[in-house]
Image (tube, rainbow, N blue to C red):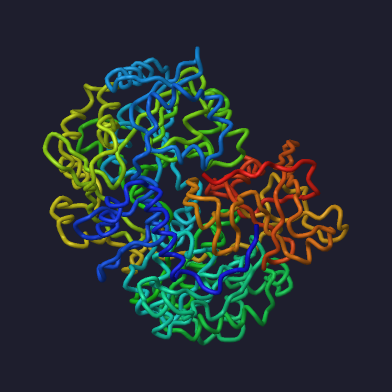
Amino acid sequence: MTSKLPKKAGGLPSVQSTIKHLLQSHRTRENIKNLLRVNQTDGFDCPGCAWGDNQHGTFQFCENGAKAIAWESTDKLVDAEFFKTHSVSQLLKQSDYWLEYQGRLAEPMRYNAKNDHYQSISWQDAFKLIGDKLNSLTDPNQLELYTSGRASNEAAYLYQLFGRLFGTNNFPDCSNMCHEASGVALTQSVGIGKGTVVLDDFDHANAIFVFGQNPGTNHPRMMNALRKASKQGCNIVTFNNLKEVALKKFASPQDPTELLTPAATQISHLYLSPKLGGDMAAIRGMVKTLVESYPSKINQTFVQQHTKGLDDYLAIVNTTSWQHIEQQSGLTQNELTQAAKVFIESDKVISCWAMGLTQHTHSVDTIREVVNLHLLTGQIGKKGAGLCPVRGHSNVQGNRTMGINEKPTAAFIQALEQTLKVQLPYAAGHNVYHALNALQQKQSKVLICLGGNLAQAASDSQFTHQAIKNAQLNVQISTKLNRSHLLVGEDALILPCLGRTEKDQQQSGLQKITVEDTFSMVHASQGMTEPVSPHCMSETAIVAHIAHATCPDKFNWLELKDDYRKIRQLIAQTIAGFEQFNQKIEQPAGFHLTNSAAELRWNTASKLANFNAAKLPNSVLADCYSNMQQTMGDAKNITFVLQSMRSHDQYNTTIYALNDRYRGISGERNVLLINKDDAKQLNLAEGEHVDISSVCDQGISREIKAFKLVYYDIPRGNLAAYYPETNPLLAIDSVGRASFTPTSKSIPVTIRVTSQKRLRVKQI
């Protein structure tokens, strides 16, 4: 199962993996053409991550982007004949990998509870069914409108407009489970919930700090920016509790020397491994070093002109002991001093982070601590410096810009009302946490999912699966079959949509859609391959038809569906920064949305950037685990802290294969990474199977069985395993304060030798 870890990431194995997945798609020729068009100015945006596009060079894709394209653009079809052969009960027994591997959804389907099979339904009947059901609800807030980050700006805008005209602000979104803490923290600190840098800033930074992130797997194109920065003399400091090979050495597949020889570029010049949940303490240690040993490096001019709350913050820093910092971070004062000196001695610093920071109970305070450090040193609002939350799915940030937000600002609702001459709801709706609770309690009756796989993305699988099954009508707008389609109650629909690579032909001609990347760049995307089925419809058209079937008198929905330029005209009238939207996207690289914080304008109540005077948490665990204390005393009762993570052959809930090349794992997903010394203390050998249990104050026992131990370079007391396999361990109420993001990176667990061995899943 295990093999020797690679000495570098990227290189020839990445090319070989790309070729393998192109061949498996059975549309090799078309997908080679797709790779030449992906992220190009006249092509389509990658359906994978949200990293920005470099406009120089012929190839603008990475290995995992190629996997996403090949996974989407396949000739394998899931149609009526497939569902005639497979009942829902039978499909529920299959793995997530097997379900998506069956191919593209090819026609609209309706669940028949009498025979437990999905059966064909016409588009017209499907839309009528939805409209009739929605109009039978006694309260518009009985509807939950979930959104995946893959949806285009046009589809997302139409979706939120439909929901609000129907009367609800219930917009649970995939961002609620990943970067919600970033949006909350940045809005509180600097007045805008987005990063302040652009891709070009990476070429000018003297130092880049990477917190809680594994770009080699989750954002591979970021590796090119880090590699280039390193070769130009930029110091890169990594905080990651796992030793990730890509953050140590990376070989660009586009560099002939690094592709064909052992040569590689060193990425991290300092690599620190904090304990899970210890990043806030680590950053506090850097700040304490600055305040105590290098006070002259505090940018007094910047602080006085642009910030508020310094005295209260410094008082908290002064009372934070080094003992507390070292204990919680798992790092020594000397290690944190080394990191602090790199930050302090650099003129231009970028800090990047991802889910390693956002999925803890104290994530908002952790991210605000990153901001505190930048405010103290004036490392914001200048070329080569700033804050960079690295978003996940390709348009997750754009969805939020378009109004997919359960707590819309009054200004946004007023702009819609004034333009459309309508009245809309102002009261906050449901995020994912509140939506699942409402479904579980049967207060909400209908769930419509615009993409994604909510069943496997959310925590507490037993709770989440039952909540989705409680929906009287479950509507899934999707490209591939997944577990969310199979959690059916009274009624369910599968509505197959076009992929990002495919032509979107409407009455006015071939359509373009738009997306926003992690750097707030907005650009056009246009697929050029023929749809896999004539029965697939674009996401935008599906939303328009649902809206037309539900509230035809509220708006001319089908006119917008016929010509997406008219949707963009509405966006231009109602969302700041999108003036002359149709004209702007004709620019080769699109256009940049102004970032107020990057311009040193602070959209906060005080009109200043705010320091956050928060104490370090007493425990990194969520409140519902308050009775579980981490201890390394009695070897038989050790409580570990577990993080969930992705494999290299995975993107979000989509599993491309059963391998994790950069961690030396092949053909397995039910594995548990553990420090060798911890395993020995428990008398456990590598390769042995264990059961993993978590217990919270709710008194509910949660367990997953037969996970194979893998020795790994990880701090003692910490464990790591893949999600969604670990989702059953995490209580639905274990969420971040102020963000409601699942605390997937700090799950308290115990392990014991397994009572059963799980059958190995064969790779198809």
Q: Is residue 98 above or below residue 720?
A: above
Q: Nearer the viewer, residue 102 or 526?
A: 102
Locate the N terminus and report the quarter of the image it occupies: bottom right
Count of numbered badges drawn on the protein: 0
Q: Is residue 211 above or below residue 757?
A: below
Horizontally, is 554 left or right of 600 in the view? left
Horizontally, is 691 left or right of 226 in the view? right
Q: Position of residue 221 (x, y in %)?
A: 39, 65
Let me know if residue 361 appears in the view: no
Q: Residue at x 27, y 22 (%)?
A: 551
Q: Nearer the viewer, residue 572 or 584?
A: 584
Name which quarter of the figure residue 172 lies in. top left
Q: Is residue 17 above or below residue 760?
A: below
Q: Is residue 754 above or below residue 595?
A: above
Q: Position of residue 540 (x, y in %)?
A: 26, 37
Name which quarter of the figure residue 601 lies in. bottom left
Instruction: Give the farthest residue toward the top.
Output: 114
Q: Residue at x 41, y 67 (%)?
A: 222
Let me know if residue 712 appears in the view: yes
Q: Residue at x 23, y 41 (%)?
A: 530
Q: Nearer the viewer, residue 564 or 628?
A: 564
Q: Residue at x 33, y 28 (%)?
A: 107
Horizontally, is 638 left or right of 128 in the view? right
Q: Position of residue 267 (x, y in %)?
A: 49, 77
Q: Position of residue 4 (x, y in %)?
A: 62, 68
Horizontally, is 50 left or right of 510 in the view? right
